[in-house]
Amino acid sequence: MKKKVAVIGYGGMGGWHCEHLQNSDVAELAGIYDIKEERRELARSRGIRAYESFEEVLADPAVDILTLAIPNDCHKEDAIRGLHAGKNVISEKPVTLSSADLQEMIDAANETGKLFTVHQNRRWDADFLSMKEIYESGTLGPVFNIESRVHGSRGIPGDWRQLPEHGGGMMLDWGVHLIDQMLQMIPEKIKTVYATMDHVTNELVDDGFKLDLRFESGLLTRIEVGTSNFVNLPRWYMQGRDGTAIIYDWDLSGKIVRCENWDEKDVVPVVTAAGLTKTMAPRDEKTIAEHDVPKPNPDVHDFYRNVCKAIDGLEPQIVTHPQMMRVMKVMEAAFESDRLGQVIPFAYDQK
Ligand SMILES: NC(=O)c1ccc[n+]([C@@H]2O[C@H](COP(=O)([O-])OP(=O)(O)OC[C@H]3O[C@@H](n4cnc5c(N)ncnc54)[C@H](O)[C@@H]3O)[C@@H](O)[C@H]2O)c1
């Protein structure tokens, strides 16, 4: 039988969950609750049941799962109340605002035995899965640098995302996705964290950031979010000893370039500005080969499929509590690094 899901918060992402659940093979929409009457009315006008209060949702025995699509500062309270009312809980990202809050949520899940997870839907992004496939294939040789960026030029949306008390800022908004992806790709301990936050259009919260994670093998990753970028840098850039991979955009445009012949003797110097260089001379097709990047075809419905199976004990939940905590600890270390202007040893991974 399909699991019944109540979506809490009928805004941008609540609407996405509702549509998704109306097309799901494993779950169905029980209804929504939003604190705003006009949002409840809108849901009703679309034929969706709107509960009158959060308590009414909790009291409905038909509801198996709560999906929390409310501002970031509200996740903790509703998750803990939901778990204690016997509901399984999916929180939108970021799961909450601090590791101490997250621990309370995990404790509530452990006490009640209910499933508690976070909607890390960008694990199903094709660009990420393409890069992960390249990384795991070893085709680039030992990888020493990975860069993951999202760039826009519209500043922070003019809602609760601009306010620290609601958990605003781009680290908590986009950073949480990009960090989670990177940690899914690289099965290594993090040694150090270094971050700088931007405040171009917003004083109170970061409107972008640059985050460098150094892993145990020496591998460096850069995660960058920008909202004042009128020209975007590529979505992904990966360097290994034997080649480079690039993905320009969400549409998977990109390429892999591999060195096929290291013994090129007759490098023609290239004229650069007011000088000559052999070091930076471009390679020709005799020494390199170009390949397409993989084009995976993921299905984000697998997130709800996994949640439903995990509730029935049929498979482990994909987005686990330790993974949620590690991402939160990285974000905390990033904020500390920016505040102190220092590289932070990532003590959490060294335990
Ligand atoms: N996973 C993703 O890809 C993704 C994308 C966008 C947003 N999100 C996350 O989804 C959450 C919601 O973001 P959004 O963009 O939909 O925001 P939004 O402002 O568009 O919608 C939030 C809705 O929640 C309602 N609300 C506020 N407090 C409430 C409460 N206590 N109980 C019930 N309703 C309440 C508001 O009235 C509003 O309708 C955030 O945590 C955000 O980070 C995730």
Image (spheres, rainbow, N blue to C red):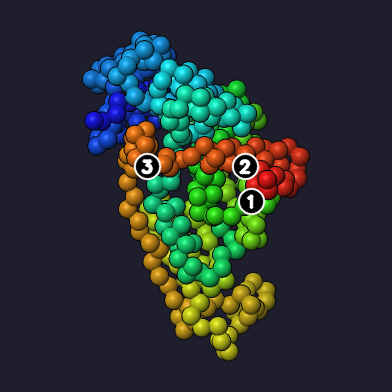
Question: Which residue does the image show at 34% across and 34% down from the upper left?
Answer: 312
User: Looking at the rendering, in which quadrant would you find the N terminus?
Assistant: top left
Please state which of residues 204 and 333 is positioned toward the viewer in this rendering. 333
Q: Is there CB contact under 8 Å for labels 1 and 2?
A: yes
Disc 1 from disc 3: Cα separation: 28 Å
The answer to whether marks 3 and 2 mark residues whose Cβ atoms lie closer than 8 Å is no
**Disc 1, disc 3: CB below 8 Å?**
no
Q: Earlier in the sequence, mark 1 or mark 3?
A: 1
Above-or-below relation of 300 to 99:
below
Residue 144 in the image: above or below residue 32: below
* Circle 1 residue: 190
Among the two numbered marks 3 and 2 on one chain, the one whose residue lies closer to the N terminus: 3
Q: CA distance from mark 1 to mark 2?
A: 9 Å
Q: Position of residue 345 (x, y in %)?
A: 72, 47
Q: Amino acid at mark 1?
A: Ile
Q: Which residue is mark 2?
A: 330
